[in-house]
Image (cartoon, rainbow, N blue to C red):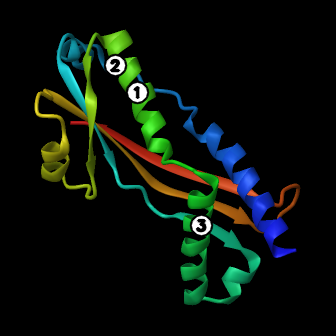
Amino acid sequence: MASISHARVGAVAVALLAGCTTIETAPLQPALAAQLHGQTVGIVIQEPASLVVMQTRDIALGPLGLLNMNAEGARLRREGHIGDPAEDIATLLGDSLAGRDDAVILPTRGNARQQDVDRILAAAPPDSRYVLTVATVSWGIMNLPAPRTDMQVTYTARARLI
């Protein structure tokens, strides 16, 4: 019975997380957009936060419940082949910068573990004039009984142009 429940949670998570990469981009101010014209932009993806799967039983376990939530999220990502949505967000933002602002997006991507600007710049492709960094800040699935829903998906990302 538990494996059916896990499979159901996994299927719902995959379906819902696919929709998390639909975003609206904020327009750059004209002066900033003009600075991007013809300039190279490298992309750096930061290591994502742990996917957390919260179920009612985890709340009662206190601190041990946190460990279980992280472990369940890691299992779900592994078994469901769920990638970091920040990759797709970076692609959409890069396409937007190239299409609307005539920036040149470099094909090689860097990866950084920290939010530290120096580490992000060090991870960027060497020819980058500007760096677009995208990070999954938090994401989770909550399987808690609530009015009109049994499951909720939360996702927060941060994008910066350095």
Question: Mark 3–mark 1 contact, CB under 8 Å?
Answer: no
* Relative height, residue 77 to residue 71 (above, below): above
Which circle marks residue 93 in the picture? Answer: 1
C-alpha span from label 3 to label 1? 29 Å
Residue 140 in sight from this viewpoint: no
Q: Residues within 10 Å of mark 2 (few under 14, many from 20)?
A: many
* Position of residue 155 measured from the top left corner of the image (x, y, whole percent): 56, 51
* Position of residue 25 measured from the top left corner of the image (x, y, whole percent): 46, 26
Q: Amino acid at mark 3?
A: Arg
* Position of residue 122 measured from the top left corner of the image (x, y, whole percent): 13, 46
Q: Quadrant of the N terminus?
A: bottom right
Could you tell me which secondary element the residue under label 3 belongs to? helix
Residue carrying label 3 = 75
Which circle marks residue 97 in the picture? Answer: 2
Could you tell me which secondary element the residue under label 1 belongs to? helix
> In the picture provided, is 151 more to the left or to the right than 159?
right
